Image (cartoon, grey):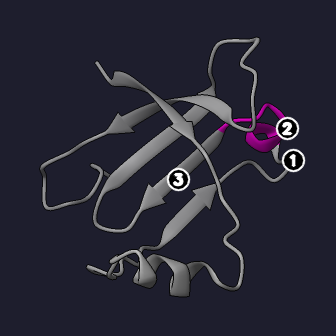
Amino acid sequence: MAQGLIEVERKFIPGPETEKRLQELGGTLEHRVTFRDNYYDTPELSLMRADHWLRQRENSGWELKCPGPAGVSGPHTEYRELTVCWHRRGRLPS
């Protein structure tokens, strides 16, 4: 059975002076992470219209994100995230 997690994601748009200010405060870039997601949906975009997101993250597996509890306030959206893990050669069974 898939294990459900709750993810709360906040997005920030840094200003043009943000990197300089962080360096003044002693901050350093430790490492940069780049990943690739492939999203899947029906031709009618049924998942997107229902605010559900099915993706395959490179080197990570499959994730389904769907809306969390109603009534969440603030500048964020809460989603329930279901992750499917597999150990068979890194691929889903065909």
Give x and y (percent) for residue 69.
Answer: 65, 13
- Residue 66 drawn in magenta: no
- Identify the residue at horizontal 75%, vertical 29% (top origin): 74
Residue wearing tag 3:
55
Name, please, the residue furthest toward the front.
Answer: 24
In which quadrant of the rendered image does the N terminus lie? top left
Between 11 and 85, the one lying in front of the other is: 11
Between 79 and 66, the one lying in front of the other is: 79
Q: Do callouts 1 and 3 mark residues in contact (Cβ within 8 Å)? A: no
Q: Secondary structure at mark 1?
A: loop
Front label number (2 vs 1): 2
Could you give the CA–CA distance between mark 2 and mark 1, rounded to whole angstroms? 9 Å
Q: Which mark is residue 49?
A: 2
Q: Which amino acid does the dot numbered 3 rest on? A: Arg
Front label number (1 vs 3): 3
Give x and y (percent) for residue 50.
Answer: 79, 31
- Identify the residue at horizontal 33%, vertical 77% (top origin): 26
Part of the protein shown in magenta: 46-52
Residue wearing tag 1:
44
